[in-house]
Amino acid sequence: MRKLYLAVTTLVLAATSATAADRMNPADARRVQSAREKLVPAIEKEFGPKARLIHLYGHGANALAGIMAEPPSEATGDIPLLAIVGWNERTGAMRVVDREFKYREARSVGTQVALLEANGDLRLREANGRTRLLAQRVGGDLFPTPKGDALLATLTRTGNEAHETSIGIVDLTGRVKEIADGPGVDAMPSISPDGKTVVFVSGRTTVASFFRTTVDGAEPVQLTNKGLSAWLLSQGEPADFVPPPVSNYAMEWVDDDTLRYNAGGGEFWKLNVRTGEASPDLGGGK
């Protein structure tokens, strides 16, 4: 269960099956194909022919990408150490943010870049090139606030196995505020465009489910998979089961109340964060 929440898999950049490709929203298919065509050649030129594009972080002119030095000789299950590049999706231009392979993930925060190191140290690379420590014991799942003045993140815990991780918000002065902490794992936070609603995925009910809270830490409200348990799922997925996202980087807000996300295998879903209503999103322009 822990790997499910802490995995940083994002938009599928590796080859997908024909069936999955058929189910992918055309806009997402175009974005993945654009990344392959424009960014991959630049990565190979800058980092060598064995370097691989692993993750896309964010959208538009301030998108970032994680680069792996070379594919492992065998699957280990470990999250790879990444170098980070900036990528302007509109122009195709790439710039190197940090060429050392020592990061787990990254996010643009305004004109600055948040970089998460393997040891859980979260650092901020300022526009002038200076880097400073923001927070420690950060597990990942970075997601910037709409104003660009803070980051949502999954925080790791120490000495409390019942609560493996929690959801926190880290402002650019380094102040950390915990806003959700339940039994097991809380992870994958995301915030609405108006900055009022925070959603995250939790295993506190034994089934990965969406919950809603606020930046002030309001009591979390379960949105999906109410009444389900891991035991029930062992008998087969019921018709009303809502799958979790592959990561919070694969979440895109359609509006202040609607979240669209990648559930893996080419499946995309839409979730109303007010009502908890969710359904597959098989196509369209968004």
Image (tube, rainbow, N blue to C red):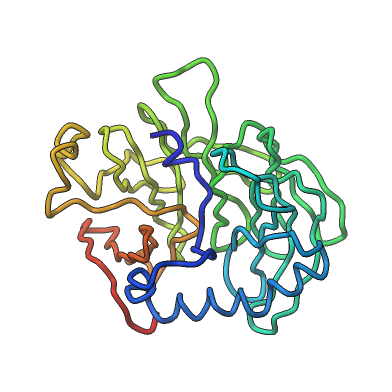
Residue at figure coordinates x 60%, y 43% from the top left: 74
Q: Is residue 39 above or below residue 202?
A: below
Pinpoint residue 148: horizontal percent, then vertical percent: 62, 60
Q: Is residue 109 visible?
A: no
Which residue sits furthest front?
Answer: 73
Image quadrant in which the N terminus is located: top left
Is 123 or 267 nearer to us in this picture? 267
**Could one spot residue 142 in this view of the protein?**
yes
Q: At which x and y percent is residue 177?
A: 54, 37
Task: Place residue 2 in its image quadrant.
Answer: top left
The image quadrant of residue 33 is bottom right
Q: Residue at x 14, y 53 (%)?
A: 240
* Point 79% across, 60% down: residue: 97
Q: Quadrant of the C terminus?
A: bottom left
Q: Where's residue 181, x and y in %?
A: 41, 31
Placement of 90 over or under 195, stated as above or below: below
